[in-house]
Amino acid sequence: MMHKSRLMAAITAAAAWAGTAATAETLILAHGYTPSHTLVTEWIQPWMQCVTDGTGGEVDFNYFPSGQIVTIPSAVSAMESGLADVSVAAIGANSDRFPLNGVTMLPGMGDTALQMVRAYRIALDAEGPMRQEFIDSQLVPVSLNMTPVYQVMWRRDVRDTVAAIAGQLVRTQEGAMSLAARSIGAVPVEMPPADIYVALERGAIDGVLLAPLSVPPYHLNEVLGAISRNASFGSSASVLSISRTAFDRLTPDAQEQVLNCGQQIETSFAAFFDRQNDELLADFAAKGIDVFAFSDAELVKMQEMLSPVPVEFIARVSAMGKPAEETYNAYRALLPTVK
């Protein structure tokens, strides 16, 4: 009898294990960011851990960082082809696929990362045209990221006037950032973040529009001489996404955990971004980088010069057959309601 009881217990345990194994899902998560990048340590990896823990191991990951199989620009096509199940859709690097989502990156669309993320979440959850762009790309947006507002960073001397910025070669990304650079008289040079170091080192560009938190992962502090602290050149949006095919393979409970973890991590990450921004600027100054402020008069000039940016954005995206003006107006109306 005891032998039979042990046999039945073993069969029951084996069946339970087999059931778990049958429903377990391993997702391929790949991206182009370095392991030390803040997006990885404070956003992507915490989300992975949250999902694995929350599903009791029902969902785990094969992880490929640093562009091993997916670069930042190729992330969306990689999810589309099945090369990756989960990756980061950088909106600026995929403006052809997500033109309306580019509204989040325009100057004046928020003051803090937390405010911008909360506004973006409301807009995407509204099931409107911004969400439709993800549906059209067969993606499910999981977790949102908005960097603190962009500052201008110079290779050498401080350039703290509009006149001094004119004609300077400034690294940007495609879309709103390039429009902003052009509006203040700079010459935009579009390139991925991984190429900035060499371009600055060789003098191929004079400066860069970037969030301070993106400086350390690419070691740009080694090749920068000056960073502004009170400019507002828009932001960068990226969305941790899962392909619709991979999402549909998950159980309903696992799907819920994937999405819940995404929203939980996005708000904690945005709050982290805001806390760390000032601390980093202080650290840069202590290490010899000139952290400077534009005068009030120069800020007024720049705001006036940046005013055509949304007009150009609306015209460009409308020409693609998208409801750009309606999306812009709705997003602007949303911002005062979000803190």
Image (cartoon, rainbow, N blue to C red):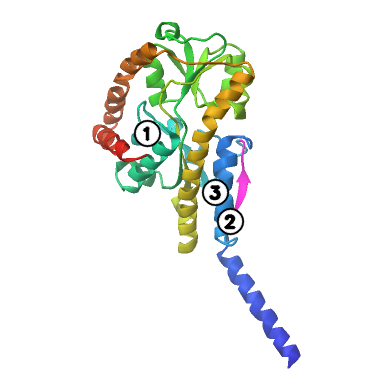
Asked whether the viewer can see residue 70, the reply is no
Q: Which residue is label 2 attached to?
A: 52
Mark 3: secondary structure:
helix
Q: Mark 3: few, some, or many residues within 10 Å (few <14, many ≥20)?
A: many
Quadrant of the image occupied by residue 112: top left
In this view of the protein, which residue sits in the foreground, 56 or 304? 304
Mark 2: secondary structure:
helix
x, y (%) of residue 294? 44, 14
x, y (%) of residue 281? 55, 24
Give the position of the N terminus as an image quadrant: bottom right
Q: Which residue is label 3 attached to?
A: 47
Asked whether the viewer can see residue 165, the reply is yes
Q: CA distance from mark 3 to mark 2?
A: 9 Å
Residue at the extreme top? 163
Q: Residue at x 27, y 23 (%)?
A: 311
Of the two numbered discs 3 and 2 on the same chain, state the one appearing first in sequence. 3
The majority secondary structure of the magenta stretch comes to strand
Asked whether 65 falls inside the magenta stretch, the response is yes
Asked whether 303 falls inside the magenta stretch, the response is no
Q: CA distance from mark 1 to mark 3?
A: 22 Å
Determine whether 108 is above or below 270 in the image.
above
In this view of the protein, which residue sits in the foreground, 93 or 274? 274
Q: What type is the residue that disc 1 sits on?
A: Thr
Q: What type is the residue that disc 2 sits on?
A: Thr
Of the two numbered discs 2 and 1 on the same chain, state the one appearing first in sequence. 2
Q: Residue at x 43, y 20 (%)?
A: 231
Q: CA distance from mark 2 to mark 1?
A: 30 Å
Mark 1: secondary structure:
helix
Of the two numbered discs 1 and 3 on the same chain, state the one appearing first in sequence. 3
Residue at the extreme bottom? 1
Residue 320 numbered tag: none
